Amino acid sequence: HDTCTTGCSGRACTCEPEADGATTPTGTGTRDSYNIQDLSDMIPGSQSGERSLVTYDEFLASFGQKNDRILAGWLGPDASAERIRRVGEAKEQEYRRLAEQHGLTPLPGAAEWIHRLHERGWKQAIASSAPRENVRVMLRALAVDRDFDAIVSAEDVTAGKPDPQVFVRAADRLGLPPERCIVVEDAAVGIEAARRAGIKSIGVSRGAPLDADIAVSALSDLPDDAFELPGAIGIADVA
């Protein structure tokens, strides 16, 4: 799940490839379930009674959210805040290790649009629920790190999506009002965050269409003038 969430406004764009550890399964697993016990085993104090598998649907539902929300659901109501923090750190470290060791493959059309918008003079920003170091690793792995003008990561916000904070902050760092931006998202919570921020959106989903202003199954399906949405002249992103 290596995609780019892009938003643009006033010849400015914010683009974000999903970069949180939840987007890359760690340890063993299949399309039906993912093993999170491997992450628990990486740190002291592993509890044998903890849930060890996450279904594929639960994995997909976590996209765009911060670790505190994701892991509270995965580990169960008895997991302490400290436990969630430590498992979250292990998850992110493993994501970065896998990304640096094996690389990342962007979804169809993602890298092409990032480069195209950059060449056209659009500013671009990453607005992500992931830790800043994840974003940096991801940008390097995809060779798009020079195409972005700003990054907003988990450290920069107090609430994850569907709270609009991450998009509003990304637009601000580009010097643009939210209403002059566009968000490109592959998660329902991200589309809702864009709506709450007053930002038009392009939803990318290989499953059920997202409730966005424009919905496609791949960025490669977008027409050349896709980002010229009425009222928008740029892009603002999330993650």
Image (tube, rainbow, N blue to C red):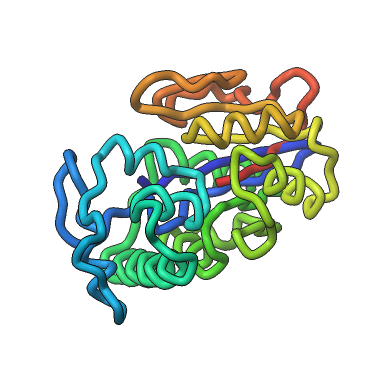
Q: Quadrant of residue 201?
A: top right
Q: Quadrant of residue 167?
A: top right
Residue 36 spot, x, y in % from top left: 25, 59
Q: Which of 99/67 is in front?
A: 67
Residue 27 higher or lower than 213, as above or below:
below
Residue 84 shown left or right of residue 177 in the figure: left
Residue 162 higher or lower than 157, as above or below:
above
The residue lying at 36 percent from left, 65 percent from top is: 91
Residue 190 shown left or right of residue 62 in the figure: right
Residue 40 spot, x, y in % from top left: 27, 69
The residue lying at 26 percent from left, 73 percent from top is: 46
Q: Residue furthest bottom?
A: 44
Residue 89 spot, x, y in % from top left: 43, 71
Locate the N terminus and report the quarter of the image it occupies.
top left
Q: Which of 140/72 is in front?
A: 72
The residue lying at 50 percent from left, 24 percent from top is: 222
Residue 168 higher or lower than 156, as above or below:
above
Q: Quadrant of residue 78?
A: bottom left
**Number of residue marks:** 0
Q: Residue furthest front?
A: 78
